[in-house]
Image: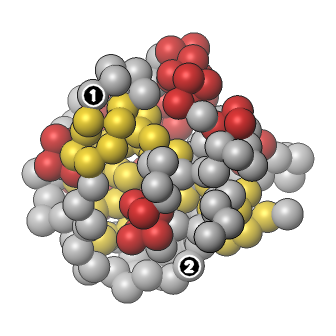
Amino acid sequence: MAHSTTQIELGAKAHHFALLDTVSDKLVSLDDVASTKATVIMFICNHCPYVKHILPELVEMAKKYQEKGISFVAISSNDVQLQPQDGPEEMKMLADEMQFPFPYLYDQTQMVARHYMAACTPEFFVYDGNKRLAYHGQFDGSRPNNNVPVTGEDLAQALDLLLDNKKPQAQQQPSVGCSIKWRVQ
């Protein structure tokens, strides 16, 4: 069942995190990845068909915008008891296979996802150079089986505006995807 993102006030400050990068096996923090231009924090996972649908284009977009000084980081927060294919070993294999140009972090406690109020995968948070939320929305309007081409146009438009020192539109389309698989408390 598809879920959409929670509305979060633009201008909200990015929450600090320090999580295991499944590729380098090192802790990576917000300060390690933050850019003075913009930082894209993405909640993704291995199993979600919505993520799989956009992943090749997302990897290419990250490469393109990293050359312009924008940083990207991906976080997986799913409970591996519910989704074993979203565990750290599998994350590393996917990152290697797809040649992720960004860290793929494991949020084992799910606290980072809770602080960001992440609800689904994929979900995109874009912070300006001051670590203030400038965009929280979809990659584009493409979904598995809707025959809309994967372009990344919504995210690209927000990033282009930030590169031009302009604010993205206040009206933003929420991400739609698989719900984050929360650990039963």
Q: Which mark is residue 17?
A: none
State the mark number for residue 6: 2
Place of residue 44 in the rendered image (x, y in percent of width and height, measured from the top left): 56, 46
Tell me if mark 2 has few (under 14), some (14-19) or many (20+) residues whose alpha carbon lies within 10 angstroms of its own. some
Q: Amino acid at mark 2?
A: Thr
Q: Secondary structure at mark 2?
A: loop
Q: Position of residue 87 (x, y in %)?
A: 60, 34
Left or right of 99: which side holds 141? right
Q: Give the position of the N terminus as an image quadrant.
A: bottom right
Mark identifier at residue 26: 1
Q: In the rendered image, is residue 63 in sight?
A: no
Q: Which residue occupies the foreground of this view, 121 or 150? A: 121
Say few, some or many: other residues with alpha carbon within 10 Å of mark 1 (under 14 / 14 to 19 / 20 or more): few
Among the two numbered marks 2 and 1 on one chain, the one whose residue lies closer to the N terminus:
2
Confirm whether residue 45 shows in the render.
yes
- Left or right of 1, for residue 104: left
Colour scheme: secondary structure
